[in-house]
Amino acid sequence: MSTPEDRPLPVDVPLIQNGCGDSCGCGHGGVEEGEGEYECGLDPALAVLLSEAGLDPVLIEDIAHLAIGEDLDGGVDVTSTATVPEDAVATGDFTAREAGVVAGLQVAEAVLSVVATREFTVERHVADGDRVEAGQKLLTVTAGTRDLLTGERSALNILCRLSGVATATRAWADALEGTGAQVRDTRKTTPGFRALEKYAVRCGGGANHRMSLSDAALVKDNHVIAAGGVAAAFKAVRDMYPGLPVEVEVDTLHQVREVLDAGADLILLDNFTPAETAEAVTLAGGRATLESSGRLTLANARAYAETGVDYLAVGALTHSSPILDIGLDLREADV
């Protein structure tokens, strides 16, 4: 199990009360004055849990609707409808098939709640961010059997994906433990899943880089070419957006000196060797935060971290992590 400090920090996210947000996939839209209250929407207690984890409940509901809508494609689950009595109820366990770090349990609950035609109960055995072993139960759900089978694949797709990202991130975080450096993600995320995948990185003990192009600046090589130089590119961004953090990508020690003199907050060291990284740390002397990118592997991660660099940027956390194998097992009926 992880300790509380290993788990994602809460983030204040406003909850949408009395119905769905305007973008909700259910089609009801928001509640206008005089329209009354819709029953549509996630369970308030589940919404609070999602919010405390730094996830927007309305976004999660939209993703859940999208996943189920894609799977049903305007129809019904023909196999479950044909083979399962309408009033049948079952209990199923979401179980880890291999060891790893779990993430996305409440998102899986949200998917099941979208497909559920009746009330259902859940028993939570672990929390997001916990290390789990093969065979360990993660979540037990009692629901209409048809509902459980219809929502199974969509819930597992998301849960396995996020747990895979968290597991990969934890391997990097463990490799860096005690160095002062953190592994950090990038914007190399699945379209529509950025908030979820970056949440999974936090569950694995990693840090998030910017969430979008608008909340921080990252001056890369093409910006440098367009602006006529690395210092000129940095100055242009700083002048137009003085309140935003500005990170500048460099590929030589000479450029490190340039952007330090220009006043850069963060410097991305692209494809530096550990020796070059150590020299850049010495040059910076604490004047800027340094991030390594490129050439990074689990095998050399600690060598980079021990140079004194602050972050290791690893796009593979979100674009290449394998899933964590998790299954849903229905319990045998009592006879």
Image (cartoon, rainbow, N blue to C red):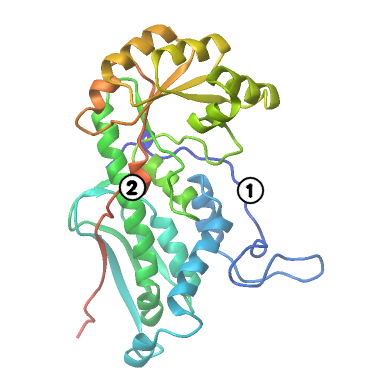
Q: Do callouts 2 and 1 mark residues in contact (Cβ within 8 Å)?
A: no
Q: Quadrant of the N terminus?
A: top left
Up-down: is 329 above or below 194? below
Q: Position of residue 20 (x, y in %)?
A: 64, 64
Name the one closer to the observer, 260 or 232.
232
Q: Which residue is mark 1?
A: 14
The image quarter in which residue 186 lies? top left
Q: Nearer the viewer, residue 265 or 150?
A: 265
Q: Which residue is mark 2?
A: 165
Q: Quadrant of the C terminus?
A: bottom left
- Dot 2 lies on which element? helix
Question: Badge 2: few (under 14), some or many (20 or more) residues near its Cα, within 10 Å?
Answer: many
Distance in Å between CA atoms under marks 2 and 1? 26 Å
Residue 51, visible in the rendered structure: yes
Q: Provide residue 90's location: percent of width, then percent of height.
A: 32, 78
Left or right, residue 163 beside residue 48: left
Pick the residue in front: 176 or 292.
292
At which x and y percent is residue 36?
Answer: 75, 71
**Image point (56%, 59%), residue name:** 44
Query: From the viewer's perspective, is residue 166 above or below residue 98?
Result: above
Mark 1 lies on a secondary structure that is loop
Badge 2 or badge 1: first in the primary sequence: 1
Q: Nearer the viewer, residue 317 or 292?
A: 292
Q: Vertically, is 283 above or below 194?
A: above
**x then y, percent, for residue 327:** 26, 65
User: Which residue is at 43% across, 69% downward?
Assistant: 112
Q: Is residue 85 left or right of residue 227?
A: left
